[in-house]
Amino acid sequence: MISESMDRVPPASQALAEPRLAHAALEAVITVDRQQRIVAINPAGLSMFGLTSEQALGLDLGSLIPPRLRAAHHDHVQRFCASGEIERPMGRRGQLLGLRANGEEFALEAAIFKSDGVLPEGGHAHCTAVLRDLSEVNRMTSVIEQLNQRLRSVFERAPVAIWITERDRVVFANPACARLVGLDQPERLVGRSIFELLSPDSHAPVRSKLQDLEQADGVSVVVGALQRADGALLQVEMVVAVLPDHEHSFVQMVINDITQRSREKQNLLRSRRTLRELSANLVAAREEERRRIARELHDELGQRLTALKLEMISCQRDHPGMGVGERAQIMLDMLDETVASARRISMDLRPLMLDDLGLAEAIDWLVKEFKRRTGIEVHTRLGDCVRLLSPELSTTLYRIVQEALTNITRHAHATRVQLDLSCTADVLQLAIQDNGVGFPLGKRTRNPGSFGLLGIRERVLMLGGRLSVANASGGGARLLVHVPLVQPPATRDDDDVGHTQEPLFDESTRGSLE
């Protein structure tokens, strides 16, 4: 029995074997009798031809075909019904036309089959056609083609080099890519492997990147070298992205020529290394000059002042007169103050105990003098390794501690400082933390004329180390220095490619370069 949801006429109660499926089908399903009158049509068919069920049922099938094609179509259906075939496609794709109720012609794709038993006189009583409207498909195909043309135009007009590969074979290249490679036509790149164009040193990283991208969608950057047609080698940066196809086999690469940028970067790195070496030499020369002046103040001037004091004492003893004695005492007091000043100036220039006794004693003296002048408590913890450090490293660490304490005096408003110096097998760590106000929020630039932390940073970089400065979690500021002990400073360069240098301030820093 035909479903109540199917439009039908009583004689066609057995027209469709599965009327529920026909009713639910997205394609038009039309059943006709031997006279090619419509006896059943599903909603999709009514919508396709713009008919109501009352208009469609009993209508000659030829009414749904443009007049010029009706005779040929009628003969085709008759021959099919008289043949022994059960089903047959009707015409090639897009060659069959339908006619809507409003007179509009549209392309169809159709198949016809015999849908019930054989009549006594031979043949089948009904045939069913399944129709697909190709007008929307054609429209979408046209839109897609237009979009493809626009996209291709965008790629072709792009000022940067772009090629698209399937696996490693180029399937598209724009004119900018051809110019980069040194070819006159981008078509000359199509079909070639990208590894024919890349230098051998670039093969491994590019292969690795392509394999990684095939497993996970994303965008990545790889640096390599591209060989032009004239033999010139270009340094290039390739932005690699997998295109959304089923097998992840299509890859787009945007290629930027970074030859000049790489050359300038190398020149900049060499310049920085030269400046850093010059700075290190200047620091060493300054320390040597300070050592010499401190020695002269201590040895030469100190000895002469001491000898002058002895002469004054002898003169006072030889001439005990009241007037001479009082004036001699005043001169002796002035000599004592001068000796003390010379000793203080000598120690400020460079404490002789740093050379004679080592870093631990020099830091101990520095801390005591700091506490005496400022009243700030300083607690120190120095590891045993401090006594084994080289003179150059000891001098640099002493200057870092000296500058850090000076900054605390000027800016921290602290009452307590913790200084820790420790070593592992290959790293020395210096940590200085105060309980002061810390760095002001939102200020991350150096004050004009203030070079304290900048000088510390340069000293740390000369040692091949790294510096971080931040507000401490419990309040105040914290300075942390890491210096390698197993690698000579001259073999390291914080500006080299691939080396990660910690910034002067980490994410929690809110201060300025004081």
Image: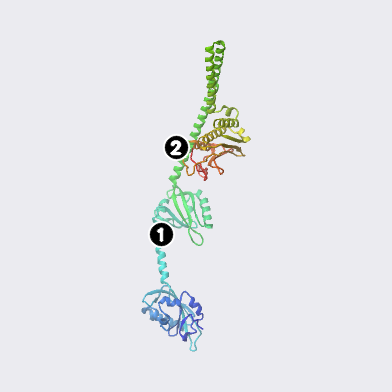
Where residue 448 is drawn, which disc sits there?
Answer: 2
Pointer 2 local density, CA inside 10 Å: few below 14, some 14–19, many at least 20: few
Near-viewer residue (379 or 172): 379
Q: Is residue 442 left or right of residue 420?
A: left
User: Dots 2 and 1: beta carbons under 8 Å?
Assistant: no
Q: Which mark is residue 450?
A: none
Q: Residue at x 52, y 50 (%)?
A: 205
Kind of element beneath mark 2? loop
Q: Residue furthest bottom?
A: 121
The amino acid marked with disc number 2 is Pro
Counting the numbered discs, the total is: 2
**Mark 1, other Cα within 10 Å: few <14 / some 14–19 / many ≥20:** some
Residue picked out by circle 1: 152
Q: Position of residue 456 (x, y in %)?
A: 52, 36
Looking at the image, is 307 positioned above or below residue 445? above
Q: Secondary structure beneath disc 1?
A: helix
Q: What whole-number distance in Å separates the C-alpha atoms at marks 2 and 1?
A: 54 Å
Q: Identity of the amino acid at label 1?
A: Arg
Q: Is residue 79 left or right of residue 375?
A: left
Residue 212 image point, x, y percent: 53, 55
The tag earlier along the polypeptide, 2 or 1, is 1
When the figure is inspected, residue 16 is found, relative to residue 184, above or below; the finding is: below
